[in-house]
Amino acid sequence: MEPRRSPRAALEALAPIPPLLDLLLRRLETSPWPEMAWTWSRLTPTGFPVEFTAPNPSPESDSSLITRRPPTESNSPADDPAVGLPMPGRCSAPLAWAAEVSGPETPDQDRLPLALAFLEAAGQPCPPLKALTQVEPLRFGAWLGGKPDGRLKLYAELPGPPRPANEGATLPHSIEAATRPRGTESARQHGTKPGAPPHAITTGAPPYGIDTALPYEIESLLPYGTAQAITRAWRTLPPGTTPRMLGIEPATRRTELYARLPDGDPLDLIPFLEATGHTITTLETQLQDGLNRLRGRRLGLSLAVTGHDVTIALFASARTLYPLTQAPDGTRRGLTTLRLNRDGTLTVTTGLSPSGGGRQRQW
């Protein structure tokens, strides 16, 4: 019988641990609740509080999760090749990562201030997000992420009460109201950015009758012209879309909105994709089985803005999206990310975490 590995050793078996992740890992290792520290997180399927993101092979590889094919070709999910991840053993190069900012003993409402303090200490301060520290209840509060080049990213939960299923996509009004500077009128009321002339932003009837605007706190992070485009694009999402999270990369001012999509057909995303300069054809031609691969799945979506560049990604459980794919030994797959590129290709990545957490309680 093999001796049990420590959580740190389980991570090191996947990839090198970068210095900033090491600092967070030390916090988890010194948690006063050691019996829960490696099994409680919502970040991964197993409850492990750290996740690596592994790039999938290129479409030309036989082991790729995506395959180029003519749009007219039809394949059954049962005909999948023996696809796999490019990690038969330990990955020698650093990987992107995400982690809890503290152990389970820290209340959810305290996690965003801790994450902001960590970013400040790392020399990558984030713009103030005071409003997001004042709204409850929370499910996870905040996570931190990192890239191989040392860039950090904040993942801040967007809390809000459940909305009726027939209500259109909108960011919680509580966040908009809380983030609006005192003495300014609501952008929701006039369709304008606070402080901007009344004619600066024009509003029309959105496709689903949705009348909302991005919170000023988020709008202020975007170039002025881009904020208008993003607001219009947000209104084209299917009714029932629920905002979940705000991602901010301080080094590049990249801002990313994450949402959960309602059950429906991928074709419902056509207005949104067209509004952001993308096309449904990318998914139809690049995914094996085309759009059928996504039908019936629980999907998430993100809209990322860097300068005037807008990037779209879809998220789905790797275990349901590609059930025949085997994760590397000792790991568990999380979400697969399908990022749509302007050249009509997909960039595919998959979250990996040690599989000893969760119900197995091996730590």
Image: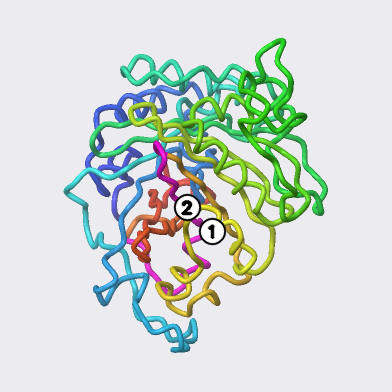
Q: In which quarter of the image is residue 99?
A: top left
Q: Is residue 334 magenta?
A: no
Q: Position of residue 326 (x, y in %)?
A: 37, 68
Q: Position of residue 78 (x, y in %)?
A: 48, 85
Query: Of the numbered discs in the image, which one, if any, rests on residue 64?
Result: none
Secondary structure at numbered mark 2: strand
Query: Of the numbered discs in the image, which one, if any, rests on residue 312?
Result: 2
Residue 35 appears in the figure: no
Image height check: is 182 above or below 214? above
The answer to the question of whether label 1 and label 2 lie on touching residues, with beta carbons closer than 8 A, is: yes
Left or right of residue 216: residue 91: left
Query: Of the numbered discs in the image, which one, if any, rests on residue 273?
Result: 1
Q: Which residue lies furthest to the left in this view?
A: 92
Q: Quadrant of residue 243?
A: top right
Q: Nearer the viewer, mark 1 or mark 2?
A: 1
Q: Earlier in the sequence, mark 1 or mark 2?
A: 1
Residue 286 appears in the figure: yes
**What residue sits 32% from the left and 19% below the top?**
122
Tell me if mark 2 has few (under 14), some (14-19) or many (20+) residues whose alpha carbon lies within 10 angstroms of its own: many
Tell me if mark 1 has few (under 14), some (14-19) or many (20+) residues whose alpha carbon lies within 10 angstroms of its own: some
Which residues are drawn in magenta?
306-328
Three-letter code, disc 2? Ile
Q: Where is residue 25 in the image (x, y as percent from the top left)?
A: 35, 29
CA distance for labels 1 and 2? 8 Å
Q: Which residue lies furthest to the top in this view?
A: 183
**What residue sits 57% from the left and 38% below the top?**
228
